[in-house]
Amino acid sequence: MPQHVLLPASFLILAAVIVVAIARDPAGFSLQPWQTIAASFVALGAATLAYSAAMAKVRLDEASAKEQDRRKALGLFLRFDFAVDVLRYEAVEHLKATAPPANPGDNTTVDVDDISLSELPEIAQAWDNLDLFPVALSQAFYDLQNDLYNFAQFRKDYAGESYPLDYGMATPDDLAALRAILTDLSAHARTALDGVREETRRLRDKPA
Protein backbone atom coordinates (compact mmCIF):
# COMPACT_ATOMS: atom_id res chain seq x y z
CA MET A 1 0.00 0.00 0.00
CA PRO A 2 1.40 3.47 -0.86
CA GLN A 3 2.64 5.45 2.11
CA HIS A 4 0.28 8.38 1.47
CA VAL A 5 -2.69 5.97 1.71
CA LEU A 6 -1.57 4.09 4.82
CA LEU A 7 -2.22 6.87 7.35
CA PRO A 8 -5.81 7.76 6.39
CA ALA A 9 -6.63 4.08 5.89
CA SER A 10 -5.42 3.30 9.41
CA PHE A 11 -7.63 5.97 10.97
CA LEU A 12 -10.60 4.87 8.88
CA ILE A 13 -10.19 1.30 10.13
CA LEU A 14 -9.96 2.53 13.73
CA ALA A 15 -13.07 4.68 13.28
CA ALA A 16 -14.97 1.79 11.71
CA VAL A 17 -14.10 -0.52 14.61
CA ILE A 18 -15.26 2.07 17.15
CA VAL A 19 -18.51 2.63 15.25
CA VAL A 20 -19.19 -1.11 15.23
CA ALA A 21 -18.48 -1.30 18.97
CA ILE A 22 -20.85 1.58 19.68
CA ALA A 23 -23.55 0.01 17.52
CA ARG A 24 -23.30 -3.33 19.33
CA ASP A 25 -23.42 -1.88 22.86
CA PRO A 26 -24.33 1.83 22.90
CA ALA A 27 -25.00 1.96 26.65
CA GLY A 28 -21.91 0.14 27.76
CA PHE A 29 -19.45 1.60 25.26
CA SER A 30 -16.38 3.34 26.69
CA LEU A 31 -13.30 4.74 24.96
CA GLN A 32 -10.96 3.66 27.77
CA PRO A 33 -10.31 0.12 26.40
CA TRP A 34 -9.49 1.64 23.03
CA GLN A 35 -6.88 4.08 24.28
CA THR A 36 -3.94 1.74 23.70
CA ILE A 37 -5.08 0.89 20.17
CA ALA A 38 -5.76 4.55 19.42
CA ALA A 39 -2.32 5.51 20.69
CA SER A 40 -0.79 2.84 18.44
CA PHE A 41 -2.60 4.24 15.43
CA VAL A 42 -1.45 7.75 16.31
CA ALA A 43 2.15 6.52 16.60
CA LEU A 44 1.80 4.72 13.26
CA GLY A 45 0.43 7.88 11.70
CA ALA A 46 3.30 9.97 13.06
CA ALA A 47 5.86 7.44 11.84
CA THR A 48 4.22 7.37 8.41
CA LEU A 49 4.32 11.16 8.17
CA ALA A 50 7.96 11.23 9.20
CA TYR A 51 8.85 8.52 6.67
CA SER A 52 6.97 10.29 3.89
CA ALA A 53 8.74 13.56 4.67
CA ALA A 54 12.14 11.84 4.70
CA MET A 55 11.49 10.10 1.37
CA ALA A 56 10.28 13.36 -0.18
CA LYS A 57 13.56 14.99 0.89
CA VAL A 58 15.54 12.10 -0.61
CA ARG A 59 13.67 12.39 -3.91
CA LEU A 60 14.19 16.15 -3.96
CA ASP A 61 17.93 15.74 -3.32
CA GLU A 62 18.20 13.13 -6.06
CA ALA A 63 16.38 15.36 -8.54
CA SER A 64 18.57 18.33 -7.58
CA ALA A 65 21.77 16.29 -8.03
CA LYS A 66 20.63 15.05 -11.44
CA GLU A 67 19.81 18.58 -12.53
CA GLN A 68 23.23 19.81 -11.41
CA ASP A 69 24.90 17.00 -13.38
CA ARG A 70 22.80 17.86 -16.44
CA ARG A 71 23.73 21.54 -16.26
CA LYS A 72 27.42 20.70 -15.75
CA ALA A 73 27.48 18.40 -18.77
CA LEU A 74 25.54 20.88 -20.91
CA GLY A 75 27.93 23.73 -20.10
CA LEU A 76 30.93 21.50 -20.74
CA PHE A 77 29.60 20.38 -24.12
CA LEU A 78 28.71 23.91 -25.22
CA ARG A 79 32.25 25.11 -24.47
CA PHE A 80 33.70 22.02 -26.14
CA ASP A 81 31.58 22.76 -29.23
CA PHE A 82 33.08 26.25 -29.48
CA ALA A 83 36.67 25.03 -29.11
CA VAL A 84 36.32 22.22 -31.64
CA ASP A 85 34.69 24.56 -34.16
CA VAL A 86 37.65 26.93 -33.82
CA LEU A 87 40.13 24.09 -34.39
CA ARG A 88 38.21 22.83 -37.41
CA TYR A 89 38.15 26.32 -38.93
CA GLU A 90 41.89 26.80 -38.38
CA ALA A 91 42.70 23.38 -39.86
CA VAL A 92 40.66 24.16 -42.98
CA GLU A 93 42.37 27.55 -43.36
CA HIS A 94 45.82 25.95 -43.05
CA LEU A 95 44.87 23.40 -45.69
CA LYS A 96 43.93 26.23 -48.03
CA ALA A 97 47.21 28.03 -47.31
CA THR A 98 49.32 24.92 -47.99
CA ALA A 99 47.46 23.74 -51.10
CA PRO A 100 49.39 23.54 -54.40
CA PRO A 101 49.20 26.82 -56.36
CA ALA A 102 46.47 27.02 -58.99
CA ASN A 103 48.67 29.19 -61.28
CA PRO A 104 52.28 30.42 -61.43
CA GLY A 105 51.39 33.72 -59.83
CA ASP A 106 50.41 31.92 -56.63
CA ASN A 107 53.83 30.41 -55.94
CA THR A 108 54.70 30.80 -52.26
CA THR A 109 56.72 29.42 -49.37
CA VAL A 110 55.25 27.71 -46.32
CA ASP A 111 57.03 28.31 -43.01
CA VAL A 112 56.24 25.66 -40.40
CA ASP A 113 56.61 28.19 -37.59
CA ASP A 114 53.77 30.24 -39.12
CA ILE A 115 51.32 27.35 -38.90
CA SER A 116 49.73 27.01 -35.48
CA LEU A 117 46.49 26.04 -33.77
CA SER A 118 44.87 27.83 -30.86
CA GLU A 119 45.51 26.32 -27.44
CA LEU A 120 42.04 26.38 -25.96
CA PRO A 121 41.41 25.63 -22.25
CA GLU A 122 38.01 24.15 -23.15
CA ILE A 123 39.78 21.17 -24.73
CA ALA A 124 41.72 20.44 -21.53
CA GLN A 125 38.58 20.87 -19.43
CA ALA A 126 36.68 18.44 -21.62
CA TRP A 127 39.54 15.92 -21.44
CA ASP A 128 39.47 16.14 -17.65
CA ASN A 129 35.75 15.31 -17.72
CA LEU A 130 35.86 12.56 -20.31
CA ASP A 131 33.65 10.37 -18.09
CA LEU A 132 30.70 12.64 -18.97
CA PHE A 133 31.07 11.88 -22.68
CA PRO A 134 29.01 9.13 -24.34
CA VAL A 135 31.06 6.39 -26.00
CA ALA A 136 30.83 7.61 -29.61
CA LEU A 137 31.66 11.20 -28.68
CA SER A 138 34.57 10.16 -26.47
CA GLN A 139 36.02 8.18 -29.39
CA ALA A 140 35.73 11.21 -31.67
CA PHE A 141 37.42 13.31 -28.98
CA TYR A 142 40.21 10.74 -28.66
CA ASP A 143 40.83 10.90 -32.42
CA LEU A 144 40.90 14.70 -32.25
CA GLN A 145 43.38 14.66 -29.38
CA ASN A 146 45.57 12.27 -31.37
CA ASP A 147 45.55 14.70 -34.30
CA LEU A 148 46.48 17.60 -32.01
CA TYR A 149 49.38 15.58 -30.63
CA ASN A 150 50.59 14.72 -34.14
CA PHE A 151 50.35 18.36 -35.16
CA ALA A 152 52.31 19.54 -32.12
CA GLN A 153 54.93 16.85 -32.74
CA PHE A 154 55.29 17.90 -36.38
CA ARG A 155 55.85 21.54 -35.42
CA LYS A 156 58.44 20.45 -32.88
CA ASP A 157 60.28 18.14 -35.28
CA TYR A 158 60.27 20.58 -38.20
CA ALA A 159 60.58 23.90 -36.39
CA GLY A 160 62.27 26.52 -38.59
CA GLU A 161 61.71 24.57 -41.81
CA SER A 162 60.33 26.22 -44.96
CA TYR A 163 58.86 24.52 -48.02
CA PRO A 164 58.38 26.05 -51.48
CA LEU A 165 55.02 25.65 -53.15
CA ASP A 166 55.50 26.09 -56.89
CA TYR A 167 52.93 25.74 -59.63
CA GLY A 168 53.10 22.36 -61.32
CA MET A 169 55.56 20.93 -58.78
CA ALA A 170 54.86 18.06 -56.38
CA THR A 171 54.14 18.97 -52.78
CA PRO A 172 57.20 18.30 -50.57
CA ASP A 173 56.81 15.06 -48.57
CA ASP A 174 57.07 16.78 -45.20
CA LEU A 175 54.43 19.32 -46.16
CA ALA A 176 52.22 16.54 -47.50
CA ALA A 177 52.51 14.83 -44.10
CA LEU A 178 51.42 18.05 -42.39
CA ARG A 179 48.46 18.35 -44.72
CA ALA A 180 47.46 14.77 -43.92
CA ILE A 181 47.44 15.64 -40.21
CA LEU A 182 45.34 18.74 -40.85
CA THR A 183 42.93 16.77 -43.04
CA ASP A 184 42.43 14.18 -40.30
CA LEU A 185 41.99 16.93 -37.72
CA SER A 186 39.34 18.66 -39.81
CA ALA A 187 37.43 15.41 -40.36
CA HIS A 188 37.59 14.31 -36.73
CA ALA A 189 36.57 17.79 -35.58
CA ARG A 190 33.52 17.58 -37.84
CA THR A 191 32.61 14.19 -36.34
CA ALA A 192 33.09 15.54 -32.81
CA LEU A 193 30.93 18.58 -33.58
CA ASP A 194 28.11 16.40 -34.88
CA GLY A 195 28.31 14.23 -31.77
CA VAL A 196 28.48 17.03 -29.22
CA ARG A 197 25.61 18.92 -30.84
CA GLU A 198 23.44 15.82 -30.73
CA GLU A 199 24.30 15.36 -27.05
CA THR A 200 23.60 19.04 -26.37
CA ARG A 201 20.16 18.74 -27.92
CA ARG A 202 19.45 15.67 -25.81
CA LEU A 203 20.44 17.43 -22.59
CA ARG A 204 18.39 20.52 -23.45
CA ASP A 205 15.33 18.42 -24.19
CA LYS A 206 15.75 16.34 -21.04
CA PRO A 207 13.13 17.24 -18.42
CA ALA A 208 14.57 19.07 -15.40
Image (cartoon, grey):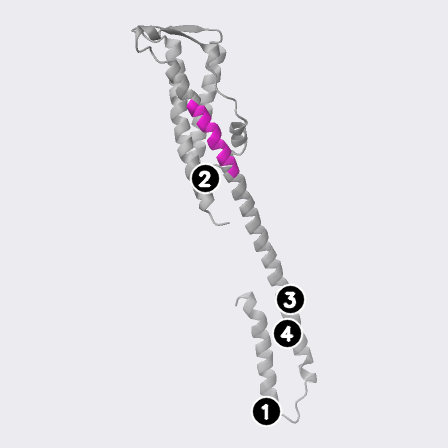
Q: Please report whichever mark, 1 or 4, sits nearer to the chain's N-terminal start.
A: 1
Magenta stretch: helix, strand or loop mostly: helix
Q: Residues within 10 Å of mark 4 (few under 14, many from 20)?
A: some
Mark 2 or 3, closer to the camera:
2
Q: Residue at x 52, y 25 (%)?
A: 120
Q: Give the mark nearer the N terminus: 2 vs 4.
A: 4
Q: Amino acid at mark 3?
A: Ala
Answer above or below: position of 12 versus 76: below
Asked whether the beta carbons under mark 2 and mark 4 sit within 8 Å of each other, the answer is no
User: Which picture quadrant has residue 87?
Assistant: top left
The tag earlier along the polypeptide, 2 or 3, is 3
Give amino acid for label 4: Phe
Q: Disc 2 designates what residue?
A: 200
Whichever of callouts 2 and 1 sits on the residue coming sooner in the sequence is 1
Q: Is residue 75 left or right of residue 90?
A: right
> Which residue matches tag 4?
41
Q: Which residue is mark 1?
A: 24
Instruction: Report, in whole angstroms, how far the alpha carbon at label 1 lies from the one at label 3.
Output: 32 Å
| Above-or-below relation of 29 to 136 | below
Q: N-terminal of the two: label 3 or label 4?
A: 4
Q: Residue furthest front?
A: 105
The part of the image, by quadrant, that contains residue 49 is: bottom right
Local secondary structure at mark 4: helix
Q: CA distance from mark 2 to mark 3?
A: 44 Å
Q: Which residues are magenta?
A: 75-89
168 lies left or right of 193: left
**Percent from the top left, x then y, of residue 57?**
61, 56
Task: Tell me the element at label 2.
Answer: helix
Dot 3 crowding, Cα within 10 Å, few <14, some 14–19, many 20+: few
